[in-house]
Amino acid sequence: MTRILCCWEFGGGYGHLFRLRPIGEALAERGSQVIYALRDVERGRPILEGHAADIVQAPVWHVPPRAHPLSQTYAQNLWRNGYWHGESLKNQLQGWLALFDAYRPDLILAEHAPSALLAARKAGLPRAAIGTGFSLPPLTSPIPCLPPWFALPETHLVQSEAKFLDGVNRVLQDLGAAPLAAVAEIFEGAARFLCTWPELDHYGVRLDTRYWSPVIYSPDEIDAPWISSQRDNIFVYLKPQYRFFHPIIEWLRESKQPTLVFAPGLDPAERDALEGDTLTITPHPVNLSSAATRCRLMISHGGHNAGALMLLAGVALFICPMELEQAVWAHRLRAQGLADMVNFFNPDSDIRRNIGAALESPQLAEHVNTFAVKYRHFDSNAMVLDLATRCLTLFAKTRDGRRE
């Protein structure tokens, strides 16, 4: 029996789990023993426990507080999330190696888990990486700039990469691991499954890369109390601590737009105070597949999983980014006419005007419909089965190579 360790290290959204769930399930159905090492076990257990052989805590980063500028590259993003602190990185790699020793996996499947890939590289384990464009950057040297609103000179990128490599290679040397000659070598020896479409790639279209398409998954939750029986609802999926949460809710309520809101963590008393005749706030997660058939606009922070599902159904997006990853994605989509967005850097965006314009824009509706028609024959289940088969083939080839 093939034993596969699925690793999730960075990122806080459900999209990581929703990508792992169908792939892990497909691997389990093919006779593999699937084990999950997760950064958030409490959140992941109810989603994955149906087919998982075990669910364990992934190594936890313990990094001293330190201010960092906004990331401009994949390397800088890793740096500001812990790689700058050598002792913490060393502990992280040792934690992954200890998990490998405990479970003796035949294959490592990394979902935004670069440290797991580095540890598997040292251990000589077969490995694969799944993710969106954000977590699977182009394999160039130096790694390219991520935010499309910057045009950085190559000398800057080279210097930034050199700083990253100097710090990381010191740790690898302490562990007796081979150094990295480039940031892209984090993925050395790993099969990469870029789970998005060219239009949804954070880096823009890549001409030399296979796109595996998004993993479209939504939990089978109880259907939500939609205001309108027609497909004219607005679905809001925002965190209540978002800076424009209350202005958005107040405008939607005042404008009498039929609206369903899911705001995880919202206080029940505040929820009751914010609701209106045409605006309902549900305390429960919403079945996105059902929502896609009931609404014409989704207002969210820009999660890739939910956004791809909605666009596939012809639902326009209005994105309110809270993080760089979301802001970059929103910028790419808006440039193609697939979404509108709140300016990530503007503290005084005109929310009312922007949302109203998105609702009334024939160009936005036309571009989204064209996208949905282009991918109307897409079969996420078939793609997941193909990906799972490729993972098992990867292990088989590695095993046979070791026997020779």
Image: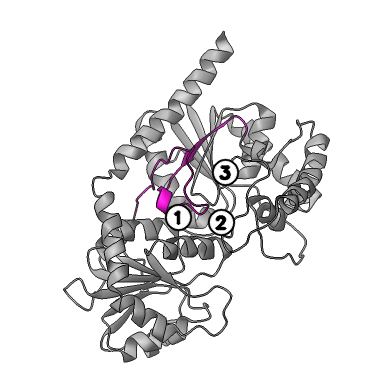
Which quadrant, please, contains the N terminus?
top left
Q: Which residue corresponds to mark 2?
A: 11
Label 1 with label 2: CB-CB less than 8 Å? yes
Q: Is residue 247 left or right of residue 309?
A: right
Quarter of the view holding residue 345: bottom right
Q: Label 1 crowding class (10 Å Cα cut-off): few <14, some 14-19, many 20+?
A: many
Q: Label 3 crowding class (10 Å Cα cut-off): few <14, some 14-19, many 20+?
A: some
Question: Could you tell me how many numbered marks the image carries?
Answer: 3
Residue occupying image coordinates x 44% and y 37%: 210
Q: Nearer the viewer, mark 2 or mark 3?
A: 3
Q: Which residue corresponds to mark 3?
A: 138
Quarter of the view holding residue 221: bottom left
| Residue 343 image offset from top left, x and y in percent | 52, 75
Identity, as a three-letter code, of the amino acid under mark 2: Gly
The kind of secondary structure element at disc 1 is helix
Q: Is residue 259 above or below residue 196?
A: below
The kind of secondary structure element at disc 2 is loop
| Residue 334 image offset from top left, x and y in percent | 43, 65
Q: Nearer the viewer, mark 3 or mark 1?
A: 3
Q: For the residues marked 2 and 3, what is the alpha-carbon distance in whole angstroms? A: 19 Å
| Residue 359 image offset from top left, x and y in percent | 31, 77
Magenta stretch secondary structure, dominant: loop
Q: Is residue 272 above or below residue 369?
A: below
Q: Is residue 11 above or below residue 330?
A: above
- In the rendered view, how is the structure colored? one colour
Q: Nearer the viewer, residue 43 or 193?
A: 193
Q: Which residue corresponds to mark 1?
A: 15
The stretch of residues the image draws in magenta is: 188-217
Identity, as a three-letter code, of the amino acid under mark 3: Pro
Which quadrant, please, contains the C terminus?
top right
Quarter of the view holding residue 122: top right
